Image (cartoon, grey):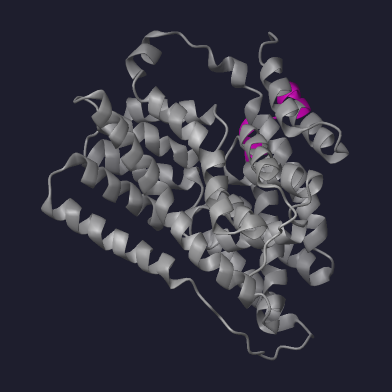
Amino acid sequence: MSYNNIVKWPVFLKDIFISSLGGYGGPEAHYGVFSDQLVEKKKYLTEEELAELIALTGILPGPSSTQTIIAIGYKTGGPVLAFLTFLVWALPVLIIMTFLSFIYVILSTLKINSDILRYISPMAVGFMASAAWRIGRKTTTGILPLIIFLTAAIITFFIRTAWIYPLVLVLGGIISLVYSKEDKSWNRIHLTPPWKYLISFVVIALISAALAIITKNTLAHLFESFYRYGYLVIGGGQVVIPLMLSDLTEVHNYMTTQEFLAGYGLVQGLPGPMFSFSAYAGGMAARGSTVVFQILGALAGGIGIFLPGILLIYFVYPVWEQLKKINIIKLSIKGITSSASGLILASTAVLLAKNGFDYDTLAVTVITTALLLSKKVSAPIIVLLAIAAGFIPV
């Protein structure tokens, strides 16, 4: 497949870093940042292409927004740039969460006022609202796409379970295909799947599971656990947290529920992928020995949980670009992208309701949305403004 050889990698990676600075609030909010920085401002891809990637990663195991931004890097410069994209996107917050695994006792004794971050969540809703508008108007050109868009939004607003998202995406594609009046013939294409990534994914899963069974090594058990979290969960960090909570605090007793929730609360105030919480959890699980061992525990958690999703998107994305050339797949994509847009709209509505309808939170959401749609203020500036607003007494 061809890549964009015009794009300078340092410039692209700088834009990825800017996206990471505004990446609060989970995958749906991340898509809003991607739409603003990587689509509207820098034109690395179109809104339609972003919607396709959101739909693709929505049916894959692993961290959806991380897989999406890796795919953007792959599209722009191939597998090497895709890996560098992941590092710029995730490494800063992974390092921070590793550090935070050492200072739980200090944090528990300090009276840190988290109220200064109270406007981050409504700001993230503004990012989501702007993305829902931009992507929605591009993917709902017609009555049928509009119906799929609204139906997906309504269903996922009322049913918030992990299985509903891939189901809605697949049904959107089927409906689009069935009711399309265009040519539904199969056309031959030459597929060249990069099997090495899928084989690596399976081999690592089997070896880590075997090591966890035959050895009592804590690091081996941690890597196996977090690798398993990475391939069992479809969606973002919010989806994997309940599984991790039960396994780490009840089954293995690596930490208390309060310690777990303390780390989860800390990651809410940091930009970047929520899967970075795994570095904190891995470090906490490996404490009690040496500093080096605790850092290795954080590495086992961070690498373990991201690796399955990285290997899967490396395998699927090149094939996806080839599959899109088949007529039937093209017709299905129209419905899938309409469904993906509906998911973003539903998530916007859900988080808007969770934030409440106080005048100040609503004002932050509306102002954020307006600034993004006006294209006059960049994402990092909006984040700084939201944090600064938190210092204003109410």
Please check the rendered image and state whether residue 344 is part of the magenta-colored stretch, yes or no.
no
* Magenta-colored stretch includes residue 357: yes
Nearer to the camera, 345 or 73: 73
Is residue 119 among what the camera can see?
Answer: yes
Say which quarter of the image contains residue 149.
bottom right
The C terminus, quarter of image: top right
Q: Is residue 50 left or right of residue 207?
A: right
Image quadrant where one finds the N terminus:
bottom right
Residue 39 position in % (x across, y down): 76, 49
Q: Nearer the viewer, residue 111 or 383?
A: 383
Query: What's the residue at 69%, 37% (across, down)?
Result: 125
| Residue 123, position as x, y percentages in the image | 69, 31
In the rendered structure, the answer to whether residue 110 lies left or right of residue 3 reads left
Which residue is more in the foreground, 160 or 236?
Answer: 236
| Most common secondary structure along the magenta stretch | helix
Q: Is residue 273 visible?
A: no
Residue 164 vertical position relative to residue 262 in the rendered view, above or below: below
Q: Position of residue 53 (x, y in %)?
A: 63, 60
Measured as percent of width and height from the top left, residue 296 is found at: 29, 35
What is the count of numbered marks? 0
Which region shows up in magenta?
351-363
Q: Quadrant of residue 119?
A: top right
Residue in the picture at 57% in, 65% down? 317
Residue at point 49% right, 30% down?
267
Q: Is residue 83 left or right of residue 358?
A: left
